[in-house]
Amino acid sequence: MCKTTTPPRPTAQDAIRKLPPNSAAAAVIPLESYLQKYVAKYSDELVPLTPPTLPSDVDPNAYKRVAFSILPLLDKAPSPYYAGVFDDDTDFSASLVKVAALFAAGQLLAAAKAALPGAASSSAFFSSFNAALKTEIDTNADDRVKHATYPTSGIIGLYPKTSSILQATGFGTSSGPSVAFTSSFSTNLSLMIVQSDDPASGVCIDRLGLGYISAALNENAFFDKTLTPGPDNTGATGRGIWLTADYAGQTIVRIACINDHPDAQLTTARLMCSLFSQIHLKQLPTSNLGIDLDTNQLMQNLLNEPKSGPNHTAPWLSPSRSPGVAPQFAIIQDKIGFAGLGFVQKPNVYSEGLIIKWNDSTQVDSFNNKIDPGNTNPSSRLSGKIAVCWQNLLGDNLTGFVDGIIDVLNDAISDFLDQKAL
Amino acid sequence: MSVRKTETRIPAGLAASDLGESFVAADGRCTLVSYITSPLAVGHENTYVVFVTDTGLASQAQSFDWSFSENGGTAATQSTQVGEAAYTPQGTGSLIVTVKILDSSSTEQATLSLTQAMVPLHAGLEALIAAATDQPGPGASDPDVSRELVNDYNPYYQAVALPTPETGDAFQQFVFSFLFEGAAKTSLSDRTQLIEDLAQALDGGNTDDFVNRTGQGVGPCNIRLPLLAMMPSTGSPLLPWTELPQPTSQNEFADQQLRQKFATLDPTAQIDCFNLARFPKSNITQCAHIIGALRDHYFPGTNFSDVLTGMSGTRAFWIANHFRQGPLSTS
């Protein structure tokens, strides 16, 4: 007889069948829409009304391209609600790019930990680790970095000076070998981030070697040599995070950028924002062993706010700098940047990478209840933390310094969370 | 790999929009079809298919570069050797899907793009599921199947209609029960795998493999391809009306013969049947057509309200059996 004896039971599913279709009205208005709205509204606070006097080797219109990247975060991942304006412009961003050196240092330590097992002694470890690094750099560093002319003094070069960065101890002991930053490297790394100290940055970058920094950035998609410096430019000289100078007098490879003459301390807002988010979300550094959480904690500790100790920096957006506008967020991690444009080194251009936390949790809850009614998918909910990068602001030429940045972030994020009508 | 045969033609008598949400290139040489019509539900995988109907472009195409950008963010990218890709929305907002058709030197030959909205899971259904969880007795059966149907196929099953309308919604109820049963019986991943296997068999001309695989129903309604060929919604039947014996052993043998006969059809007819059953939108439409045709053949003059409620549902029972195993001989 028949293989199937169960009759259909249409009435059992009728309540489900009669539900109306999902509505596009439930889709959120993208953060991008609010960002564009408020960048336009506050353009007078972001761009000098009177055209500034710029060096002849700087694009006379690039100062108008103040870049923003905003990436709301979930608990353990970036959210899909990214927004950016001029965020793919590769700009000179001065000391902000020191975070790239911090990243490379973290990657090096993580790689060293992965290379440690099997080494019988410290010298054997360094010998094999250096050989592996040489292969990695020869393979993955940018050709312009590999073929650059370096000072004969050897102060800065292609390959890392690993024995001045790392100390490997404990070979032959019951607890086994371990590797960590040397005391002097650790001190200089801290000074580079906490005080944004240029000589200390020089020590770190010189020891890391430009080849290793380039390879690490390329391997993690923070630089793409096949792209133009910005979406509106020609010439595939590369786009992303580029660090080939040491803040201590050595500038080795200049490449084209948007806001300055060819330079050596560059980033896009998008990729610096991504780097901050990946560090904060404990996704970096990585090695064959996976994510090195101990080294990640070390990196986070340096970026944390408020920083402490003598000469520590304060965020540009910090209330302690008495801005004309109160931020609607707290700053929990930060690195600032500023320096002069062109060969005459003026005017100054300002930048910042941050992790912020939105003050009004009820706004975050309201947004989460819209995208995830009933809390059926907790992993999709915003945490209230947001990765931000802004750059290319001629702050000294503006009446309110960074007030325009705060205004844009306040209003764009607040309206996005409230899903206000545009 | 060049364009598969299954992606070289839209079924005869239909438009791409009959298969799903679609975007046709301005020059008409290629078309992008989305299984699910916007809005897409977050966390629900959607499949996109590129039809390259121009023979010149089809001969040039060697690979496909896909990008999926949510809310203007960095796009997730895929490179595929065939014109099909899947993507699962991560958040609500706007999704831009772009596919570039590349030649052997990876030079772009054509680009297609589709913008879709992404929304949370259907709030009304989630409330029903939550209520069923909190209350004793039967409730929203199989929440995952309910979520797939309501979030992904709702506009498709809401749109089914008889050529001659009837009072009430018994027909729509009946079609939905076939859809629910088919989706519950065969998981989405198994359905996807069967479609991939059938496409490969059709593309490679592997008749034995194709005959074996057509023993299973295709798509969310589990439509058997020979049955579809017997009663197409447009045009003349591709196979003559053939009733199969009811006893299991005889039914299986006769069904095997029917599938072999289907495999001897013109390849374009096989591809058209495959694509009609492949896309959820046309799958549900064709299921509704077959159910209506089976009612007209075996119980002419009976409306679907009577089919469901009269004679203790016996007629509904038999239509279901004809759909699953037949058409069956009743003599």
Image (tube, grey):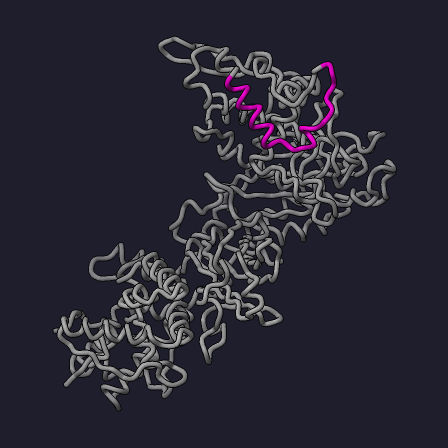
Looking at the image, residue B135 sits to the left or right of residue B188; the answer is: left
Instruction: Check if residue B278 falls in the magenta segment.
Output: no
| Magenta residues, dominant SS class | helix
Tell me the magenta residue range: A128-153
Tell me residue B42's x, y (percent): 44, 55
Q: Identify the image quadrant of residue A338.
A: top right
Instruction: Check if residue A141 falls in the magenta segment.
Output: yes
Looking at the image, residue A262 sits to the left or right of residue B312; the answer is: right
Quadrant of the frame with the C terminus of chain B: bottom left
Looking at the image, residue A306 sits to the left or right of residue A245; the answer is: left
Tell me residue B168's x, y (percent): 32, 82
Q: Identify the image quadrant of residue B182.
A: bottom left
Of residues A231 and B205, the one nearer the viewer is B205
Identify the residue at image location x=67%, y=40%: A239
Does residue A186 appear in this view? no
Q: Is residue A166 above or below residue A103?
A: above
Identify the residue at image location x=41%, y=83%: B234
Of residues A29 and B73, the one nearer the viewer is B73
